[in-house]
Image (cartoon, rainbow, N blue to C red):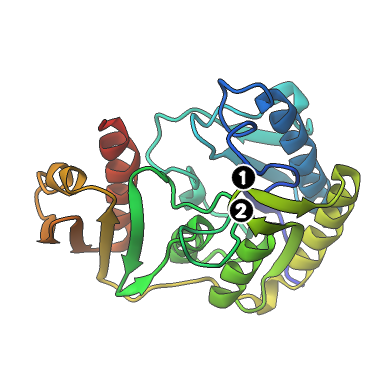
Amino acid sequence: MGAIKKVYISVDIEGMEGVVSQLQTLRSNPDFNIARKRLAEDVNAAIKACLDCGAEEVIVCDGHADMENIILEDLHPEAKLISGAMRSSLQMQMIELGFDAVIMFGHAGAGVTKNGVIDHTYNGRKIYNIRMNGETMNTEGVLNAVIAGHYDIPVVAAIGDKAYAEEMTSFIPNIETIVVKEGTSRFSALSIHPTKAREKIYEGVKKGLMKKDIIKPLKLKEPITMEIDFKDSNMAETAELIPGVKRPQSRTIEYTGDAETIFKLQALIIFRLVDQLP
């Protein structure tokens, strides 16, 4: 195993054990504080695994909703936290600075796998499909892996529900997946206890890091053509105002360009622009 000095952990909340509805994913709802505390402990298990594998620096990127979910005092003291939504990348901020490996906490993509728990693609109310070079990539973890891959960084471990694990493995065959729940519908799941989940996360992340050298970064051939199918046509109308964006169908936009432009455009359209529409 090559040396592992810097590890990046991208974190979303829907894939963790026990989370099955918006009761725990929205700040305004009663069980949100339960979920955010549990999330920090799960992430800490991953951080400890990284440190025990020799990592000298661990960066955690809070990537859920307003991106201020993890309370800094709850995080392992040896890790650093990226938080706040006004950023240039939804869930991979600062990845371009160079890391040896990436770990993802995530969830199933919109409509990809049956019984994906709270399955969606970034914005469940507005995004229907995302395609890269003609291939559907609705799983946020896969799209994040493409960003990491552009910088030659492999995603070595993915933590979430069974559907998410299957979706990540379909694009990254040697990735270590840690399943903490199995969906019985979109809003129902069979979860393991948080204590058991953290044990699995710790051991799974260690395994992923140990096989880093056989996990290839996920790369796309450039130029990349990104297509987004929206839920409603007015969203495509708004995105079409961006120079270079084409609109081949009423609810679909497309853009072809270099990888870094595609990544920025994705963040602009999905979060800064479309998310503000009614």
Q: Report if residue 71 is visible in the image.
A: no
Q: Which mark is residue 46?
A: none
Residue on which disc 1 sits: 14
Q: Position of residue 190 (x, y in %)?
A: 77, 54
| 218 or 7, nearer to the observer | 218
Dot in front, 1 or 2? 2
Q: What SS does tag 1 mark? A: loop
Residue on which disc 2 sits: 117
Q: Position of residue 277 (x, y in %)?
A: 25, 32
Inter-mark Cα distance, 1 to 2: 8 Å
* 35 left or right, relative to 143: right
Q: Amino acid at mark 1?
A: Glu
| 128 or 149, nearer to the observer | 128
Q: Quadrant of the C terminus?
A: top left
Q: Position of residue 69 (x, y in %)?
A: 61, 28
Q: Amino acid at mark 2?
A: Val
Q: What SS does tag 2 mark? A: loop
23 lies above or below 212: above
Count of numbered badges drawn on the protein = 2
**Are circles 1 and 2 on residues that touch, CB within 8 Å?**
yes
59 lies above or below 50: above
Place residue 163 in its image quadrant. Answer: bottom right
